[in-house]
Amino acid sequence: MGERIVMVDSGTGLGLTEGQLDARSAAASVRLRRRGVRAGDSVLVCLPVGPDLLVATDAVIAAGAVVWPVPPELDAPALRRRILASHARVMISDLPHAVDAADGSRVRMVMSVADLGGGEAVGKRVDAG
């Protein structure tokens, strides 16, 4: 019996196990702290639903910061309003339109999934059904 799958990536069909989630989140949390994220900081997370979003969210919480989720499907004006309202200095996103929307805000550091040590294919193929 293998480890429990906590999420299946709908794009790849690969499952993320509890162990993989814990390992990736712990490594990402360390990277966030090394980049200056401290307890109580707001961190924008603008990623599509999937393993990277789950890892980023867990990492921000583990670093003691506050996750400020921003749906990536928002139009540019709505995305910009959310970013400005957050007063966050850090954003985690690989999406060019989100990075553009942060221009002129308090965001001073944009981290990609790769910066967090993620983005690699993980897990095993999970059959639907």
Image (cartoon, rainbow, N blue to C red):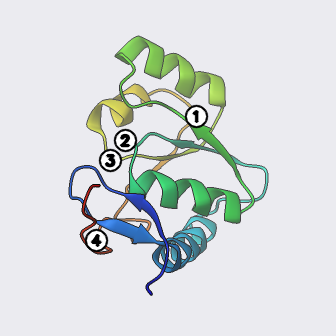
Q: Earlier in the sequence, mark 4 or mark 3?
A: 3
Residue 106 has which mark? Answer: 1
Q: Residue 37 in the image: state x and y as whole percent.
A: 65, 59
Q: Which circle, 4 or 3, is nearer the viewer?
A: 4
Contact (Cβ within 8 Å) of mark 1 with mark 4:
no
Quarter holding the N terminus is: bottom left
Between the C-alphas of marks 1 and 2, the distance is 23 Å
Image vertical order of residue 105 relative to residue 47, above or below: above
> On the image, numbered disc 2 is attached to which residue?
48
Closer to the camera in the image, 17 or 29: 17
Q: Which circle, 1 or 4, is nearer the viewer?
A: 4
Which structural element holds mark 2?
Answer: loop
Between the C-alphas of marks 3 and 1, the distance is 18 Å
Q: Residue 108 in the image: state x and y as whole percent.
A: 52, 44
Residue 73 has which mark? Answer: none
> On the image, numbered disc 3 is attached to which residue?
94
Q: Residue 32 in the image: state x and y as whole percent.
A: 57, 65
Image vertical order of residue 76 relative to residue 54, above or below: above
Query: 71 left or right of 107?
Result: left
Query: 89 left or right of 47?
Result: right
Q: Earlier in the sequence, mark 1 or mark 4?
A: 1
Contact (Cβ within 8 Å) of mark 1 with mark 2:
no
Which structural element holds mark 3?
Answer: loop
Between the C-alphas of marks 2 and 4, the distance is 16 Å
Please tell me which residue is depicted at 53% across the width and 28% down the height of the picture. 105
Residue 118 appears anywhere in the view: no
Please, what is the three-letter code of the amino acid marked with disc 3? Answer: Asp
